[in-house]
Amino acid sequence: MRVLNYLELASRLDRSGIGTAVDQQRAALSTTDVEVVTTPWRGGNLLRIPGNALRLRNPVVDFDVAHCNLIGPGSLAVARHARYHDKPLVLHAHVTREDFAGSFRGSEAIGPALGRYLRWFYSQADLVLCPSEYTKRVLESYPVDAPIRPVSNGVDVDALRGFEDLRDAYRTQYDLDGLLVFAVGSVFERKGLTTFCRLARETDHEFAWFGAYDTGPHASKAVRYWTQNPPENVTFTGWIDDKRGAFGAGDVFLFPTKVENQGLVVLEAMACGKPVVLRDIPVFREFYADGHDCLLCSSRAEFREALDRLADDPALRKRLGANARETAEEHGLDRLGERLVEAYADAAAVRTGGGAPR
């Protein structure tokens, strides 16, 4: 089976959650019998389309199944091509109206239009994949008129190896000391930025957020305010060269995000054996157990108490971290590869009249 596993704007999404998820799909598929191509354009470039057309060559590569990971014009073109040629189409719902809100300035305003587009776009698929049962319920509420199957994004444990060796270098580079409460990823208000900074103001712990942030016209007011006026005990590092350095430098992973489809960075922190403190939202209840492999909090007071408990109790940090590592191992790439191969086979069965995906 030859699968087009496509992520448009890949270079811009290289270090995003979506980019990491797609990298993990391809790594997982590399251990299977599936042949993967990553660009739909013959010659690897849209600019070659006119030349291919003049030579009467199809500008789109040959594939048996199309798997698109974004929702833009490139993905739409692939979806149309797959439909026209009666090829199985798998669309991966990394983007929902709910998780887009709070990411950029004006994102809430375009939410209703985005929701209508997503309903239409995802409904073209033979099979929609999404990271969680929570996301499946969200898509069903639109409603998306296609079979929907949750498949964990997984976590590439091997890619994180060696994080411990980077601890001293990253702490020195950003002048960090003592027990460090940290977050990793792009700085958005949806990720709980205001809660993160207010907690820092209310505690004596050192805080650091490892990740890029925008202070230009696309940035929300909250991002511009907090990154330009951080509490004294908060460091915003901006872009870092190696995310393993963040997991090496940090001690307690704090993620007070408001909405997630899964939260890949949580699995990465767990794979590194870090105790994690999360907002109590449905998607985290789906994957994790409060008091076993994480601490779930519903209010700022609960977040403060959780951070203080962890700061005062090294044994608790160790136990939560060990259990978290075991949880992450349950999301290994071997399982992801198996689920993707099953999904492609089921989508192909729909095209050939073999019935709906399970």
Image: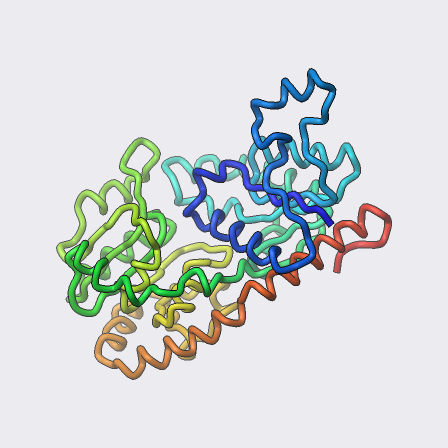
In terms of depth relative to the viewer, which is nearer, 297 or 223?
Answer: 223
Residue ranking furthest to the right = 353
Colouring of the image: rainbow
Q: Residue at x 27, y 37 (%)?
A: 215
Give the image quarter of residue 301.
bottom left
State the image coordinates of residue 212 (x, y, percent, origin top left).
31, 45
Q: Residue at x 37, y 75 (%)?
A: 321
State the image coordinates of residue 336 (x, y, percent, origin top left).
60, 61
Q: Is residue 340 above or below residue 299?
A: above
Residue 339: in sight, yes or no? yes
State the image coordinates of residue 308 (x, y, percent, origin top left).
23, 74
Q: From the image, which quarter does the C terminus lie in?
A: bottom right
Q: Residue at x 61, y 50 (%)?
A: 139
State the image coordinates of residue 324 (x, y, percent, origin top left).
42, 73
In terms of depth relative to the viewer, which is nearer, 219 or 251?
Answer: 251
Give the image quarter of residue 305.
bottom left
Residue ranking furthest to the left = 232
Q: Is residue 162 above or below residue 1?
A: below
In terms of depth relative to the viewer, which is nearer, 133 or 346?
Answer: 346
Q: Would residue 336 be found to the left or right of residue 192 on screen?
A: right
Q: Would residue 327 be found to the left or right of residue 82 on screen?
A: left
Q: Residue at x 47, y 51 (%)?
A: 20
Q: What is the total number of numbered labels drawn onto the structure image?
A: 0
